[in-house]
Structure formats: structure tokens, C-alpha cells
Image: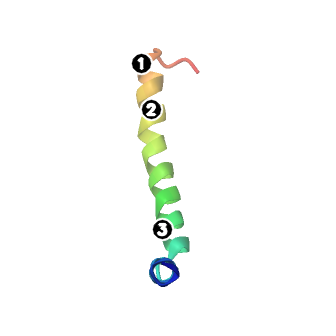
């Protein structure tokens, strides 16, 4: 059983988590711009 867990942990260790987090944050920032514009348009331009 521990061999299986070590294999999974070793496989996950090879993933570049920093790059995944950075890409996720950049995507969130890029999506948030149009969302703000859309919400402003729905509210008639008032913040």
C-alpha cells in the first residue's frame, strides 16, 4: 500500500505547481476585466 502512495506522491511531485498557479491567476485576471465591464453595463454604468 505504501508503494502505491509513494508512486502517486512521486508522480505529483513532477508537476510544476508554480506554473499552474501562475497560469490560473493570469486567467482569472484576464476574465475579470470583461466581467466588470459586463456588470457595469447591466447596472447602467454606475459603480
Distance, label 1 to label 2, CA atoms, is: 9 Å
Residue at image location 48% in from the left, 59% down from the top: 24
Tell which of 14 and 2 is nearer to you.
2
Sort mark 3 into few (<14), some (14-19) or many (20+) by Cα contacts within 10 Å: few
The residue indicated by pointer 3 is 20
Q: Between label 3 and label 2, give the one nearer the viewer.
A: 3
Instruction: From this view, report whether residue 8 is shown above or below residue 26.
Output: below
Do callouts 3 and 2 mark residues in contact (Cβ within 8 Å)? no
Distance, label 3 to label 2, CA atoms, is: 27 Å
In the rendering, at what x and y percent does residue 32 appear?
Answer: 48, 42
Tell which of 44 and 24 is nearer to you.
24
Instruction: From this view, report whether residue 31 is shown above or below residue 40.
Output: below
Instruction: From this view, report whether residue 27 is shown above or below residue 9.
Output: above
The residue indicated by pointer 1 is 42
The residue indicated by pointer 2 is 37
First in sequence: mark 1 vs mark 2: 2
Amino acid at each position: 500500500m505504501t508503494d502505491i502512495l509513494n508512486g502517486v506522491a512521486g508522480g505529483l511531485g513532477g508537476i510544476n505547481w508554480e506554473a499552474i498557479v501562475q497560469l490560473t491567476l493570469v486567467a482569472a485576471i484576464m476574465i475579470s476585466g470583461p466581467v466588470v465591464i459586463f456588470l457595469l453595463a447591466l447596472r447602467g454604468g454606475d459603480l
